[in-house]
């Protein structure tokens, strides 16, 4: 938790009691969990989308389902799962692009792909930012759960156990989804790379 | 192998190119969410009442329509008592 000295259990109890200071407790809970939720939403939402509405939706869902929290997992993990499922729902509702073609890339992005192919890219910030933008375009063509896998495992470099904790999926499901996602992404990248030939 | 290496290089570059995310809540965000949560709680019984009231209204309209059409049908099948009283109704055949 971001705030030192924040008593999560007591705060949850105050929210649940629906007493006079429930609003204060709810506010404190949102403030304490905001960095966690914002980080997840920023990481999994397409770049073009505004994250604030979705962050608010995650919190509304969290409060609506608060009675379902049984304390079997840490509260932060439970909230992460709510955030992840909300992001996946949002991504499902959006239309996926079938694929990204060489002609869809800007001139600068094409240069980055060429440099990566020719092993000429060496820690240039501008090129790395462009590579990240290209990756976002490729991720738009993946299924929401696959996109989630690439973001968590490849970009955030989380372990399988951490991904299981955040998503609530078992390790077998995570491994299979990760394998498929990586395979698809690689195929998309190779297709894009053909434009350099 | 070369393909794998190129793909790995691409992923590595993309990883390093991730923009830093601002994880500070916008002004009054927590207050807005907290008040929405509590208002939603207060509104819940009212919404339930509203939903029931609308259903009740629909049922009442259906009943009123059924009763109304029933009454009209009965009235049209026999002369009204007022017309009988005023002697305006068709005289019935003398059975004697």
Image (cartoon, rainbow, N blue to C red):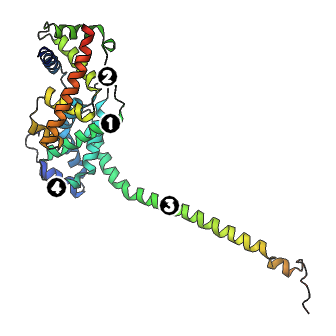
Q: Quadrant of residue B76?
A: bottom right
Q: Nearer the viewer, mark 3 or mark 1?
A: 1
Instruction: Tell me the crowding category of disc 4: few under 14, some 14 to 19, or many 20 or more residues within 10 angstroms, Cα based.
Output: few
- Where residue A78 sits in the image (x, y, percent)? 17, 46
Vertical placement of residue A174 versus A49, above or below: below
Q: Nearer the viewer, residue A158 or B38?
A: A158
Q: Earlier in the sequence, mark 2 or mark 1?
A: 1
Q: Which mark is residue A92?
A: 1
Q: CA distance from mark 4 to mark 1?
A: 28 Å
As helix, strand or loop, the secondary structure at mark 4 comes to loop
* Residue on which the image places disc 4: A70
Instruction: Tell me the crowding category of disc 2: few under 14, some 14 to 19, or many 20 or more residues within 10 angstroms, Cα based.
Output: some
Q: Earlier in the sequence, mark 4 or mark 1?
A: 4
Q: Quadrant of residue B28?
A: top left
Q: Nearer the viewer, mark 2 or mark 1?
A: 2
Q: Residue at x 20, y 31 (%)?
A: A180
* Residue on which the image places disc 3: B55
Instruction: Tell me if residue A21 can be seen.
Output: no
- Where residue A124 sits in the image (x, y, percent)? 14, 10
- Whether labels 2 and 1 belong to a single chain: the reply is yes
Q: Are marks 3 and 1 in contact (CB under 8 Å)?
A: no
Q: CA distance from mark 4 to mark 3?
A: 36 Å
- Whether labels 4 and 1 belong to a single chain: the reply is yes
Q: CA distance from mark 2 to mark 3?
A: 49 Å
Q: CA distance from mark 2 to mark 4?
A: 42 Å
Q: Residue at x 10, y 32 (%)?
A: A158
As helix, strand or loop, the secondary structure at mark 1 comes to helix
Q: Which mark is residue A99?
A: 2
């Amino acid at each position: 938790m971001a705030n030192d000295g924040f008593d999560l259990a007591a705060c949850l109890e105050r929210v649940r009691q629906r007493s006079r200071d429930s609003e204060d407790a709810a506010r404190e809970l949102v403030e304490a969990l905001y960095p966690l939720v914002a980080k997840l939403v920023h990481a999994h939402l397409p770049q073009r989308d505004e994250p604030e509405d979705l962050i608010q939706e995650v919190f509304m869902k969290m409060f609506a389902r608060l009675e379902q929290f049984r304390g079997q997992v840490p509260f932060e993990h439970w909230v992460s799962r709510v955030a992840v499922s909300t992001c996946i729902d949002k991504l499902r509702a959006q239309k996926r692009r079938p694929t990204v073609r060489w002609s869809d890339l800007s001139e600068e992005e094409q240069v980055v792909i060429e440099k990566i192919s020719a092993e000429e890219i060496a820690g240039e910030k501008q090129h790395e930012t462009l590579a990240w933008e290209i990756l976002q375009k490729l991720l738009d063509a993946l299924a929401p759960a696959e996109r989630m896998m690439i973001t968590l495992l490849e970009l955030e470099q989380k372990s399988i156990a951490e991904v299981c904790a955040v998503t609530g999926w078992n390790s077998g499901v995570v491994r299979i989804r990760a394998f498929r996602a990586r395979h698809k992404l690689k195929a998309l990248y190779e297709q894009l790379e053909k434009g350099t030939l | 192998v070369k393909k794998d290496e190129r793909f790995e290089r691409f992923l590595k570059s993309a990883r390093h190119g991730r923009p830093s995310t601002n994880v500070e809540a916008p002004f009054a965000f927590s207050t807005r969410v907290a008040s929405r949560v509590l208002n939603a709680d207060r509104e819940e019984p009212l919404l339930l009442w509203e939903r029931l009231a609308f259903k009740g209204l629909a049922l009442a309209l259906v009943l009123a329509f059924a009763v109304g059409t029933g009454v009209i049908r009965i009235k049209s099948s026999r002369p009204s008592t007022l017309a009988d009283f005023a002697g305006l109704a068709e005289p019935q055949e003398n059975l004697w």
